[in-house]
Image (tube, rainbow, N blue to C red):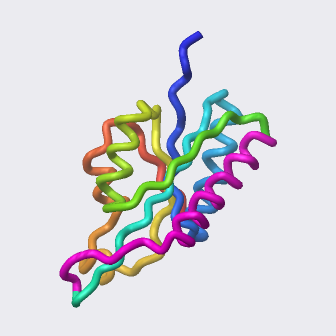
Amino acid sequence: MATQTPLLVAWDGSAPAQRAFEYALELARLRGLPLHMLSVLELPEVYGGIGAGEIDPQELAGANARVAALCERARAAGVNCSSAVRVGVATELILAELRDSRAVGLVLGRSDKGVLMRWLVGSVSRGVIAQASVPVTLVP
């Protein structure tokens, strides 16, 4: 039996990400799809934006524990689930995970950032939508 391609959920711990997980869980349950949870930890900037800092090992362990707990909730609801935590640039890593997992779609929470902040720092959602080759659902 072939492995079924998952529905990818990008998770950053925010309230919109929580709503995106709830939506994706129900969609996966109704469609009989597995979930694949992805959390991306971006490297902190140092020296005024030049270079990159390091990820605290406790932060990495915490991120792994949080997505593992979400997968446990999914399994309790009858949905197969896997998870991954990556370190780097969110847009690039989400797109890579879409390709590598052969996901049928992506669900992510819409950022609560204002227009000025999106213009200044860019938008993960916008970058992913522009380059994704599968349907992307933004959950407010």
Farthest residue, direction bottom: 48
Report whether 71 appears left or right of 82. Answer: right
On the image, the x and y values in percent for residue 118 come to 31, 75
On the image, the x and y values in percent for residue 54 come to 37, 74
Farthest residue, direction right: 76
Report whether 73 appears left or right of 137. Answer: right
Q: Quadrant of residue 65?
A: bottom right
Report whether 20 appears left or right of 22. Answer: left
Q: Residue at x 59, y 58 (%)?
A: 64
Q: Is residue 129 above or below residue 6?
A: below
Q: Residue at x 43, y 71 (%)?
A: 55
Q: Is residue 66 above or below residue 82?
A: below
Which residue is nearer to you in this view: 103 or 57?
57
Whether residue 111 is in magenta: the answer is no
Q: Quadrant of residue 14?
A: bottom right
Which residue is nearer to you in this view: 62 or 129?
62
On the image, the x and y values in percent for residue 42 come to 38, 68
Quadrant where the C terminus sits is bottom right
- Counting every numbered tag in the picture gives 0
Q: Residue at x 63, y 50 (%)?
A: 23
Main SS category, magenta section = helix
Range of the magenta residues?
49-76
Quadrant where the N terminus sits is top right
Which residue is nearer to you in this view: 106 or 88?
88
On the image, the x and y values in percent for residue 60 come to 52, 65
Farthest residue, direction left: 50
Farthest residue, direction top: 1
Q: Residue at x 45, y 70 (%)?
A: 111
Whether residue 69 is in magenta: the answer is yes
